[in-house]
Amino acid sequence: MTQISACINKKNITIIVFSLKLSIPSFTSTTIPIHRHFSLESFQETCPNNGQHPKPMLKSTSRHQQQQTMVSLVKSSTHKPHLLQIQAHLTRSCLLQNPKFSLLFLSSLCSSRDLRYARLFFSQIKNPSSSQYNTLIRAYSSSNSPKEAFFLYREMRQKGLKPDPISFSFVIKSCVKFRSVFCCLQVHGRIIRDGFLSDCLLLTTLMEFYSSFASREDACKVFDEMSQKDTVAWNVLISCYLRNGRTRDVLMLFDNMKNEGVCEPDDVTCLLVTQACANLGALEFGEKVHRYIKERGYGTARNLSNSLISMYSRCGCLDKAYDVFKGIGEKNVISWSAMISGLAMNGFGRDAILAFEEMRKTGVIPDEQTFTGLLSACSHCGLVDEGMEFLNQMSKEFGIMPNVHHYGCVVDLLGRAGLLEQAYRVIISMKVKPDATIWRTLLGACRIHGHFTLGERVIEHLIELKAQEAGDYVLLLNIYSSTGSWEKVSELRKFLKDKGIQTTPGCSSIELKGIVHEFIVDDVSHPQKHEIYNKLDEINKQLKIAGYVAETTSELHDLGAEEKANALSYHSEKLALAFGVLVTRPGTTLRVTKNLRICIDCHNFAKFLSGVYNRQLIIRDRTRFHHFRDGHCSCNDYW
């Protein structure tokens, strides 16, 4: 016998059913059959009692004890048959309009996720309170119908009920889900009008909304309006900057947060900042964050350790990444995948495969990210046969269907190896729809190998997806210029001008002493610009003596050889490297991050620079890492 069936008197079943039908006339046709079949037989089926008759629901005790029993039943019931019986009793005993019981029952309905039933019950309450509205608004804000939460909020206001911070918080969350800036702006205006700007939790939720819509300025305004800023508010702001690509500002915010001393960075802060350091290649700042993690005792957090592995790997510091990896007590699949990906991106493809084999020996089952790292390792090192074998193995042996990222690695692998037509066939035969990124990967390979016919076909696919960008046309310009097709270059330039398509300027950054310095082509904004340009001229003279010759195919204008060489002299990565040589001691490793692909000329420039000046250089561009040491590059054979 269930708890409910033990509490309902058999002879009252007919009365309960009758009262239920009378009290809920607005029930829809989908709910009527439930009550129509609410007979003694069906009741005994849903509430089995080993063939015995149900016991009375409420014994002859005091009214207070009866109400306490009802409260316990409401709190413990989640199944619809039980809830229907409880509602029938609430109706029969005139407790339906009692705010205490109706709120409890509505909460139970929302917990059961039957929001249609909850809404029908809510409609039977004559004068719903703010708490009852909030309960339903909260349920809808996390459901598949978040707009209903906003409609309820609007109805609440129309009835003269004043929303409180709880109402506003869940309405804002619903606006995030159905992505309505206009609705949230209305809510924000009401928050200001009702005087809730001192509620930090509410303003933090509002910041999350603006952050999710990449509105950094509005999120900052809300943050500045806070009278007391807690760690959660700082983390939301940092997350907003990170999402908007303002990674350099994330480092500044971390320092500000520490220096103010009001609320210290927590493990979430450290996780966000290590991601920013990884994106910037800011090794020194990342090391400072790592020290802070150890000081605060966060070192045992596995998610932080995994993030540190990724950060050190993306800064080209594999030894430290491996030290963090070794220090993890129980390595999960994310830990192993981070280490495999780190080895892959730094050009240690064979070691990544060995790490995968070791992972399997420990009994850890690989996931999608593991195979992304493996296929990336094969791509970086030109392991075509191994890559195709892993692609087949992941589905046959582990039941993991390749996604667009896996196919992207395979296309990059085949493209780097010069197997362009095979790469094209892989995309056409994919079981998932190819996205713009995978077509751009093939377009990059067409640029490397000068295959402009296939490049034009790829651009057509991008146009079909309505995903073409200025960078795609720049790659096509590279292909035309490398083959000397200046007429096509002119036509494409005219097309870009007529369409108003503007290219993204190349930007290179280098971190020194915890400060990130950024450069663009022909940059004159740096305080030490005169010293930088003098140093770059000196480097150019030394490299020419060593045999460096400018790769003029990287220049997209139809100029003479000398003019092309001059135009290539002041690319952003060259300025960043010259600055690094200028301000660091001999032998210091230089790490540069670029937002676009490094051109062939700058690649050759860095290779000669590493040999002549005895420097280890690590340049991370949009697609991969380039490690230069003693005049050689780890990825040179597949450039």
Image (tube, helix red, strand yellow):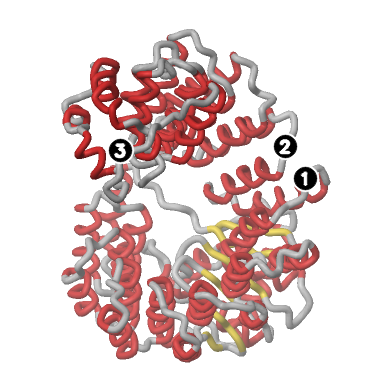
Residue bearing mark 2: 229
- Mark 1: give few (<14), some (14-19) or many (20+) Cα within 10 Å: some
Q: Can residue 200 be seen in this view?
A: yes
In terms of sequence position, does the residue under pointer 1 or pointer 3 come before the other? Answer: 3
Contact check, label 2 and label 1, Cβ < 8 Å = yes
Residue 266 spot, x, y in % from top left: 71, 54
Q: Quadrant of residue 335?
A: bottom right
| Rendered position, 250 above or below 88 | below
In terms of sequence position, does the residue under pointer 2 or pointer 3 come before the other? Answer: 3
Residue 433 spot, x, y in % from top left: 22, 61
Question: How far is the residue under mark 2 from the one under mark 1?
Answer: 8 Å
Residue 256 spot, x, y in % from top left: 76, 47
Quadrant location, the C terminus: bottom left
Residue bearing mark 3: 81
Q: Is mark 3 on a helix, strand or loop?
A: helix
| Rendered position, 208 above or below 101 | below
Between residue 213 and residue 118, name the one nearer to us.
118
Mark 2 or 3, closer to the camera? 3
Q: Is residue 26 visible?
A: no
Q: Residue 263 carries which label?
A: 1
Q: What element carries label 1?
A: loop
Question: Please, what is the three-letter code of the amino acid marked with disc 3?
Answer: Pro
For image coordinates 44% across by 36% down, the residue present is 176
Between residue 53 and residue 383, name the one nearer to us.
53
Contact check, label 2 and label 3, Cβ < 8 Å = no
Question: Please, what is the three-letter code of the amino acid marked with disc 2?
Answer: Lys
Q: Is mark 2 on a helix, strand or loop?
A: loop
In terms of sequence position, does the residue under pointer 2 or pointer 1 come before the other? Answer: 2
Residue 155 spot, x, y in % from top left: 40, 15
Question: Please, what is the three-letter code of the amino acid marked with disc 1?
Answer: Cys
Q: Which mark is residue 453?
A: none
- Mark 3: give few (<14), some (14-19) or many (20+) Cα within 10 Å: some
